[in-house]
Image: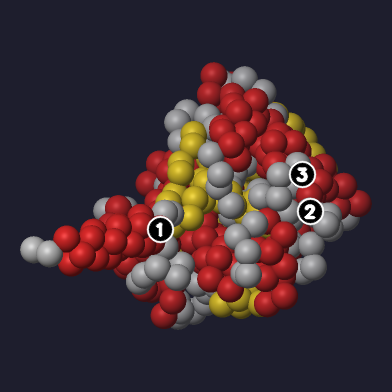
Amino acid sequence: MKPEILRGICIVSAFLTLGSCYKQDPIKIGFVSGLSGRHSELGVSSRNAVHLAIDQLNWSGGINGRNVELIIKDNKSDPQTNMRVITELVDDGVVAIIGPLLSQMAETTMAATNKKNILVFSPTISTDELSDKDDHFMRVMPAASRQAIKTTEVVLNDGISSAAVVYDSTNQKYSEPIYLLFKKTFTEKGGTITYLDDLKEGRNANFLSIARKINESAAESLVLITNGMDAAAICQQVRKFNKSIRFYGVYWTKTGNIIERGGRSVEGMTIVAAYESNPRSARYVRFFSDYSERYKRNPLFNSMFSYEAASILIYGLQHSDKLDGDSLKRTILNKSTFEGLEETLTLNRFGDVLRKDMAVVIENGRFIRKTE
């Protein structure tokens, strides 16, 4: 082969190799949640949904031919661990972070990303401390105050005049404000809080002892501001003493396979939940099928929110002129309205979501929409 032809082949090969490397250079996205410990079921189901959305994007060609790489971090539901792993993601060059999920992580999340030009998109952080702030934080979960108001409406509409409350102080930024607003509104309408427990002992809490005290308080109802796993365990203990007390829960309570874990004890429980169309939308049915087939389990409500957060972020990646927090934020907020899995979602100018909610009742082992 002539030397000039050989040189030409080498040059072309070099360019092809460089082009191939460039195309394979991924866009890095972080995902942060508690993947071990007490709240791991929430984290794992959200991670699965985000993974599904990112894989579907990559299968369809990625962002202008570039794949998106999802870098996953376990914050162990601990604020300081959360700050460390988010700092690691920032140092690793992610352009955005999906998560965390617990409101208790909000402060260290914002501290770790402050002035870093990184967009943080949480599926389920709902603390009102982040409402109406011009920052790089967005969410698809309604503010905690909205959940408190809706829960109070549901309880009062059922004619309840006394309530025991159990909230999880390990996620205090979420649970305590809901309790305080519920208490304020409920007592202003003539209701009485007969017993309160903040589960400050966490997983070591004595649910049997708590149940006994709830029964002794003679409350007509028990309002649970906890995850579904703990709610199910508490309801089982309460039913040993009281067969007629009414159970209520918030968004978080609809996690943790509460029906499977609670069994007959949670029958009749009313939960404030994300809006569900009837019949379910085609988008949701497709997501449900894809998720269930891949992970061999049904998605939770937070799985749906996580998929929606990932989908909105993907829109930003596809349409932004630059891949940084400012550009992604501007692109997403300029559109502001997105088709979610069940409804149209609107983000206000601060990145806080406006969406519907509803109440469901557990009947015969299923969530049934409550007639209001």
Measured along the vertical axis of the image, is residue 242 above or below residue 310?
Answer: above
Q: Residue at x 60, y 40 (%)?
A: 90
- State the image coordinates of residue 260 (x, y, percent, origin top left): 38, 46
Residue for point 68% across, 56% down: 325
Residue that badge 1 annotates? 22
Determine the secondary structure under disc 2: loop
Q: Earlier in the sequence, mark 1 or mark 2?
A: 1
**Where is residue 210 drawn, in percent x and y?**
61, 26
Q: Residue furthest front?
A: 3
In the rendered image, which residue does mark 2 sit on?
135
Between disc 1 and disc 2, the foreground one is 1
Q: 193 or 304, which is in the foreground?
A: 304
Q: Residues within 10 Å of mark 1 (few under 14, many from 20)?
A: few
Q: Residue at x 91, y 51 (%)?
A: 188
Q: CA distance from mark 3 to mark 1?
A: 28 Å
- Three-letter amino acid code at the position of disc 3: Lys
- Which one is earlier in the sequence, the residue at label 2 or at label 3? 3
The Cα–Cα distance between marks 2 and 3, rounded to whole angstroms, is: 10 Å
Q: Is residue 304 left or right of residue 91?
A: left
- Residues at circles 2 and 3 in contact by the CB criterion of under 8 Å: no
Secondary structure under the numbered disc 1 in the rendered image: helix
Q: Amino acid at mark 1?
A: Tyr
**First in residue order: circle 3 vs circle 1:** 1
**Location of the N terminus (image quadrant):** bottom left
Question: Measured from the top left, where is residue 82 in percent x and y?
Answer: 60, 32
Name the residue that disc number 3 marks: 115
Asked if residue 134 lies left or right of residue 91, the reply is right
Relative horizontal placement of residue 306, taking residue 59 as reference (left or right):
right
